[in-house]
Amino acid sequence: MNSDFATIDALKTELDAILPMGDADERRLWEKLRLEWNFHSNHIEGNTLTYGETVLLLLHGQTHGNHSLREYEEMKAHDVGIKHLRNLAADKSRLITPSDIRDLNKIILKEPFWKPTQTPDGHPSRAEVIPGEYKTLPNSVLTASGELFEYASPLEVPSRMQALVDDLEKSLGDRKHHILTIAAKLHHDFVLIHPFDDGNGRVARMLVNYLFLRENYPPIIVPTEQKRDYLTSLRLADAGELESLEAFLGKQLEKSLKLAVGAAKGESIEEPSDVEKQVTLFIREQNSKDKVNEPDDDVLQPFIDSSVRPFVKKLDTKMRTLAPLFSRISLMATNGNGELMLDINPASTPTLNVVRPQAKHSFSYSYLYYQSSAANAFTHRTKVEIEYKKEGYALNHDGKILISKPYSEPMLAEEIDGITSRILAKTFEAIRSKAGQVG
């Protein structure tokens, strides 16, 4: 037997032997799990409320910190979603349905909103997200290798969602697989469908916890600190290695089971990390008064690898199309280790490192000596910068911001193509204008 399975089974047996839990112990266990679940699942998706602010909001109805109203509202809506999910799991007379899953999405998103998108030809646009409604447009994600990973098409969604719950019913009926295997497959199958325009990650984690709660296990928490490991396990599952996702979920279930056993025995379930969260909150509040926070390396480097590298490669290719108009092109690139002068050629894309201390990448293109019969052949310079802040990144061209997002929303391939096309168009327009003046 898989050692992870054996550990989980032993802990579940231990927990079952000391149940039922006292009312007070059950309340303190659930309060802790509920708060952790709300905080981490939303934080993974870009919500910036701290753990302390989450506690203040959900337990006391008070707000603290400089956050958007939407961030407070989505945290409260997610809490309502957890309560609804708990009721669904308690009903052993039936299994969750696609309609129930749509209701979960409707609850956590709460109300329609507009989301930035792009047209097929790369122009900025927006689309309305309707909570609880399946997607009407294709969705995809840019992988770390720069490849575009397409989820199920809108036409496939209804049938694949029905197949998802049918497969869950079969797995629970024949009991041929361990609950971790069933949970990993359920999570991964849902992610492959990505049925909604927004909220898919939170609903995926809710589905896993629906399974655990229905089978009398405590819910798991996917810690925001382990987001990279979590996403890596999902990518490995894409490649057919479901065991990695099983192992990741197993570690979280082991932690929750140990917590439940401790609570059932009347032991303290206050972890050092809970106290540390409060200390971190206080320090952050004090430091933020005088200091601008920089993004963490474990957030910044994956973003650079998955978004910035493909962007720079695409930008370089497009900017080079103007080369025949000039005697020479040069690139001044600031990559965190000073400035590097490069001549444009296919191998000249600059090395991209985690940026310290400037907190940005800068790419200055110089088009030298317009090849014209005019005596005063001109030179044209243009600059593209990507600035990295604590809350997210911003990309600007000659000082005009083209995109600003949290790190949880990387640049997709279509977005990269659209932005670089706009930069090329603006640059070409400026050059053509200068050429008209000197011609």
Image (tube, rainbow, N blue to C red):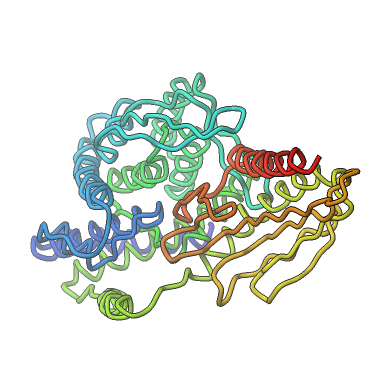
Frontmost residue, 41 versus 159: 41
* Residue 96 appears in the picture as rendered: no
Residue under the point 47% across and 68% down: 295
Give the mark count: 0
Residue under the point 46% across and 48% down: 178
* Residue 256 appears in the picture as rendered: yes
Residue under the point 19% across and 66% down: 264
Q: Residue 83 location, x and y as percent? A: 19, 45
Give left or right: position of 170 versus 290: right
Q: Residue 7 location, x and y as percent? A: 43, 64
- Res 39 quadrant in image: bottom left
Q: Where 311 sits versus 25, above or below?
A: above
- Res 136 quadrant in image: top left
Q: Residue 223 location, x and y as percent? A: 39, 62
Give left or right: position of 153 versus 293: right
Q: Where 125 sits versus 438, above or below?
A: above
Frontmost residue, 245 versus 422: 422
Frontmost residue, 116 versus 28: 116
Frontmost residue, 391 versus 269: 391
Give left or right: position of 172 versus 142: left
Q: Residue 300 location, x and y as percent? A: 54, 64
- Image quadrant in which the C terminus is located: top right
Q: Where 323 sits versus 114, above or below?
A: below
